Image (cartoon, rainbow, N blue to C red):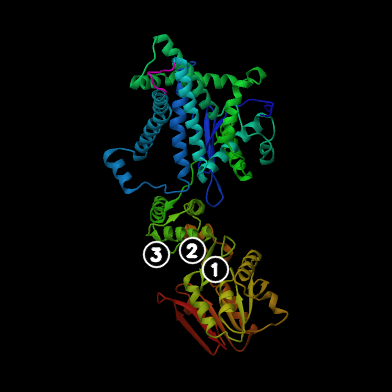
Amino acid sequence: MKSKEKTVKKTSIGGQAVIEGVMMKSSTSMATAVRDEDGIIRVESKRTKGKKPSVMKWPLIRGVVAFVNSLVGGMTTLMRSAEVFGESEPSKFEKWTAEKLKINVMSVVLGFSLIVGLALAVLLFIFLPQLAREGIEMLVGNGFTFDIWAKNFIEGGLKLLIFLGYLFLCMLIKDVRRTFMYHGAEHKTITCYEKGLELTVENARSCKRVHDRCGTTFIVFVLVISIIMFALFEAVVGQSITGILRILCKIALLPVVAGLSYELLRGLSKTDCVVFYPLKVPGMLLQKITTKEPTDEMIEVAITAFKTVMELDANPEKQEQKFIVPEKASELVERVYKKLKDHGIEERAEAEWIVSIKSGLKRDELTEEKTIRPKFIEQIDLVVEERIKGRPLWYCIGDTEFYGYTIKVDERVLIPRPETELLAENVIKIANGKTVLDLCTGSGAIAIAVKKECDQVSVTALDVSADAIVVASENAKLNEAEIEFIHSDMFTALSESGRKFDVIVSNPPYIKTEEISSLQKEVKDFEPMLALDGGIDGYDFYKIIAEKVKDHLTENGVLLMECGIGQAEEICKMLQGFSKVEIIKDYENIDRIIKAEI
C-alpha cells in the first residue's frame, strides 16, 4: 500500500454513502445530497446539536452511543434518500394507522428492519462461525477440542471470511456497486478538505478513496477486538463456554467491543505517526473493497453535502432544507389547492392548471395514480409561491394559449382574454390575401393568430410600448409567424408614409382611470397600466382611432375593435363616415366587438 497522504487540517465531519448520494455529518448538523433521476442534486439538511448527558461523552460509553446512532441514523438516512426516487406520500393504510392508532408505520418498519438486521448479524457473525468451528472439531474426532485462544481465532477467521464473502456477493448488485462508488466520493471529499485543498471535483478526484475514520476500519477493529475480548473473558472465567451460552455472552460483550473499537478508531485518526500505521493497514485494505472510484458527478454530490454541513455550522441563520420528493398527481393537486385557498384563491381550476401545465399531464390525468417527479414539483411550488403573492396565474406560468398558439406573457403585456379570441376569429374570417394592421398589439396574440390562420396575409403590428414590441417579437419567433413590428404611438409612425391596410384590428385600453384602483389585485398591481388606462371616460383611444383610421384604411377596408361593457353604443356614434357599423356580442351575450366597413 502507498504511504498515507499528509493531513494538513482535521475535521470532525464524517459521512455515509446512501442511494445515489452521500450524507455528511458534523457534531452539530448533517446534510444528505442525492442526485435524482433528472440529474438534479437534491439536498436535505438539519441541525443535530442537542445537549447530551455528560455520561454519554465518557470513553467507551460514547462509542456504544455512536454505534447505536450510526445504526438507527444510517438506516433512517438510507430510507429517506430512497424517497427521492419513490413515493413520498403515505399510503391509505399509513394514514389510517397514524390517525386512528397514532402509529407511524415507517417507524415500525424501521424498527423491524433494525431488529432483522441485528438478528442476521448475530446469525452470520456469531452463530455460524461457532457452528462451523464446532463442525471442524467433530470432523477431527476423538473428542478433540481447540483451546480458548484457538477457538476464538478460528471463529474470528471464519467471521472475516463470511464478511468478505458477503461484500463480494453485494458487489454483484449494480446498485450496491454504485453505493460503493459514492462511498469513495465521500472519502475523497473529506480527504481533499483535510489536505487543505479547495473543494473542487478536480482536486477531490486526485485524493485517495481510503480514510482513517471509515466505518469499514471500525468493522475490522470489531472483529479483532471481539476475538481478544472473548478469549480474555473465557480465560478469566477459567473454562471454555459452549452452546447458546457462548452466543449470549458474545452478544453481551458487544457494547464493550464497540466502545473499545470506537476509541481505537478515534485515537488512530488523530495521528499520522508511522508507528501506528500497521494498525490502520487492514482497514484500509478492506476499504479497497467497500469503496470504488467515483465519477465526477458523484464527487460533486459529496462536495455539495460537505459544503452544506460547513455552511450550517458557520451560519446559525442558514435555513434547514427538505428533499423535494415525488408525489401522486391527485394528492399534489389537493396540496396546491389547499395552499391557494388558504391565501384567498378558491378556484380549484387554478390548482389543476398549475399542476397540469408544469407536469405535462392532461387535466383529466390528474385524478389517476400518476407520480410527478421532483423536477416538476419544484417548478409547481415556485409557481404557487408567486401566485399566492397575487401575481396573475399566466404570468406565473410564463405563457398562455391564444387561439391554439402559445403566447409568452409577463408584466410587460396584458394577458390575452378569451373574448379577444372572438375578435381574432372575426378578423381571420375576412383576412385571407389582405393586409392587416394590429393596432395596440401588446403580446402580439391577435397578429400571430391571423398570420398563422390565413393564407397570403401580410400582418403589421404596432404598439407604443417598446417592451410590448419585444415580447410580441419573441412570440412571433416562437410561433414562426412572419410579422412586421413597429414601435409607434398609435398611427404616428404611419402618418408620413400614408400606409393603408385592408383590415385594422385593435384591442385598445378602455378602463376608466378612476376605475383602475377598484380592479382585481392581479390586474391593477401587475398588468401594465399603459395597456389598461383608457382615460377619464375610457374612450381616449377610440377617439383617436375614429379620427385617424380612415386615413389608413383602403377602399372597402374594415375596422374591428374590442370594447368594454356598456361602451359599444357610444363608440359606434364616433364612427361617422362608415357605410356599415355593427356590434358583435361575445360568448356571454355582451356587446364586445364593433365592426365598421367603409
Vertical side of 578 occupied by 342: above or below: above
Give the residue type at disc 2. Answer: Glu
- What residue is at 45 percent from the left and 32 percent from the top? 73
Quadrant holding the N terminus: top right
Vertical side of 404 occupied by 18: above or below: above
| Rendered image: mark on residue 364 | 3
Q: Is residue 483 left or right of residue 591?
A: right
Compare marks 3 and 1 and give the one earlier in the sequence: 3
Pointer 3 with pointer 1, Cβ within 8 A: no
Q: Which stretch is magenta?
A: 140-146
Q: Nearer the viewer, residue 61 or 458?
A: 61
Task: Examine the image and state in which quarter residue 352 appears.
Answer: bottom left
Task: Tell me where residue 194 appears, x and y as whole percent.
Answer: 65, 29
Task: Examine the image and state in which quarter residue 106 appears.
Answer: top left
| Rendered image: mark on residue 515 | 2
- Nearest to the eye among marks 3 and 1: give it: 3
Give the residue type at disc 1. Answer: Thr
- Nearest to the eye among marks 2 and 1: give it: 1
Say which element carries label 2. Answer: helix
Pointer 2 with pointer 3, Cβ within 8 A: no
Say which element carries label 3. Answer: helix
Write down the residue under mark 1. 406
Compare marks 2 and 1 and give the one earlier in the sequence: 1
Task: Tell me where residue 95 appears, x and y as whole percent.
Answer: 32, 45
Count of labels in the image: 3
**Circle 2: is it few (<14), some (14-19), or many (20+) Cα within 10 Å?**
few
Task: Tell me where residue 366 appears, x and y as whole percent.
Answer: 40, 60
